[in-house]
Image: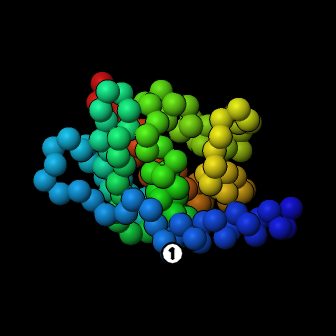
């Protein structure tokens, strides 16, 4: 288990140091921007999503926060770009369940997002890990 935890820690640090899809797109109305913050940790992030034909064509993120929060935004965007809204919602729900320590659907390929499974043991970090995912959820809900 120690090796696995090390591996997960490496995945998180890798995304923290070299975040994917970071930086917002300016002056493009096809993107929807969501802002969420987590005052208890100081995390403050923006997530932008672009949906076309029910597909998440692009996800961008920016902001500041702890390693858990920033890396999670990178993982979330990389995992969900190109997915249909339905697929993305299923992955999102699975991630939120996993962070709460609930049983997850093993059929869903969580890729790097599985690295956050240990966060359920640290209630103070739950908001950090889920902030960007909650922003995405808000963006998906608001578009209806
Ligand atoms: Zn945080």
Left or right: 100 with respect to 81? right
Toward the viewer: 21 or 136?
Answer: 21
Residue 113, horizontal then vertical, whole percent: 61, 51
Sort mark 1 into few (<14), some (14-19) or many (20+) by Cα contacts within 10 Å: few
Q: Is residue 105 above or below residue 65?
A: above
The image's colour scheme reads rainbow
Indicate left or right for 12 with 6 as reference.
left
Q: Where's the N terminus, which quadrant?
A: bottom right
The residue lying furthest to the bottom in this view is 17
- The spot of residue 50 in percent (x, y) is 30, 41
- Please report the residue visible at 48 percent of the width from the left and 27 percent of the height from the top: 86
User: In terms of image quadrants, where is residue 6?
Assistant: bottom right
Residue 125: image location, x then y, percent: 59, 60
Q: Is any atom of residue 34 visible in this view?
A: no
Residue 24 in the image: state x and y as whole percent. Answer: 27, 59
The residue at which mark 1 appears reads as 17
Q: Is residue 98 visible?
A: yes
Q: Is residue 73 above or below residue 104?
A: below
């Amino acid at each position: 288990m120690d090796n696995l935890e090390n591996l997960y820690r490496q995945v998180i640090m890798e995304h923290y140091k070299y975040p994917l899809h970071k930086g917002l797109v300016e002056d493009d109305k096809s993107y929807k921007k969501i802002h969420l913050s987590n005052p208890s940790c100081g995390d403050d992030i923006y997530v932008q999503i672009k949906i076309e034909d029910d597909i998440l064509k692009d996800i961008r993120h920016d902001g500041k926060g702890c390693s858990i929060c920033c890396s999670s935004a990178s993982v979330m965007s990389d995992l969900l770009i190109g997915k249909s809204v339905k697929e993305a919602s299923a992955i999102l729900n699975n991630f939120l369940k996993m962070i709460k320590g609930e049983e997850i659907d093993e059929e869903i390929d969580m890729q790097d997002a599985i690295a956050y499974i240990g966060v359920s043991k640290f209630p103070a970090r739950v908001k950090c890990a889920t902030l960007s995912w909650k922003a995405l959820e808000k963006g998906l809900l608001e578009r209806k």
